[in-house]
Image: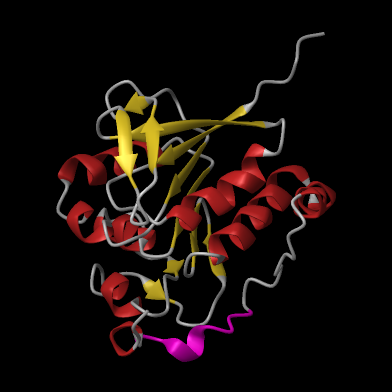
Amino acid sequence: MSAKKKMILGAVFYENFELLDMYGPLEMFGILNEIEIVTVAEKAGPVKSTQGPKTVADFSFDNCPPLDLILVPGGIGTLAELKNEQMLEFLRNRSQTARYTMSVCTGSALLAKAGLLDGRRATSNKLYFDMAVSQSDQVEWVAEARWVEDGPFVTASGVSAGTDMALGIVSNLFGRERADWAAMVSEYEWNDDAGHDPFAKYLNKGSDLSG
């Protein structure tokens, strides 16, 4: 009897992506033997995060294999990518055949700019919510949500919310017990209520805060 084929998750990187946006969800997806993760960027090779550490993209947009799942992070690099037609076209093309196209934080701004969220509900990082909203007035932007699922598109709020979203998708794909197992072995306390958003009170207050 042949082994069941794994789902392929494409982690899409770009310069100055947010580390936890990507690696929080990848921890939850990667711990499962049902999913294989591949790293993708416009050009193969090292891609620097906002925090400094680099990730090696094994595939470019041109030679990326077929993807069942797509994960797009946010970060300060989002601003440059909003003007990158290669990125937007890659997302348009690959989302057509993906089971889920997911974003974390300001990654939803890229999906909106590409026109993928038109007519759908979506959310984004609360501190910089208006940045995502400004990319499309055809999206029903949800200001208070940990993550929002609308058909094949799933958008998470800021940074750590992506990990909760990932477990929600694991539950959709493989059952609640599998999601609970992934959270348990990671010693992660899963906020499994997509509508519970304790950070909504900071809506668009990013410019008021300094680290």
Classify 206 as above or below 73.
below
In the shown orientation, is residue 99 left or right of residue 184? Answer: left
- For the point 80% across and 46% down, the residue is 178
In the rendered image, the quadrant that contains the N terminus is top right
Total marks shown come to 0
Q: Position of residue 172 (x, y in %)?
A: 70, 51
Q: Which range of residues does the magenta coloring cover?
A: 196-204
Q: Is most of the magenta stretch helix, strand or loop?
A: loop
Q: How is the image coloured?
A: secondary structure
Q: Position of residue 148 (x, y in %)?
A: 53, 67
Residue 58, quarter of picture? top left
Q: Position of residue 42 (x, y in %)?
A: 25, 34
Classify 2 as above or below 146.
above
In the rendered image, the quadrant that contains the C terminus is bottom left
In the shown orientation, is residue 88 left or right of residue 54? Answer: left
In the shown orientation, is residue 89 left or right of residue 98? Answer: left
- For the point 25% across and 30% down, the residue is 43
Q: Nearer the viewer, residue 85 or 42?
A: 42
Tell whether position 200 is magenta. yes
Q: Position of residue 182 (x, y in %)?
A: 76, 48
- For the point 42% across and 70% down, the residue is 124
- For the point 30% across and 45% down, the residue is 14
In the shown orientation, is residue 200 left or right of residue 176? Answer: left
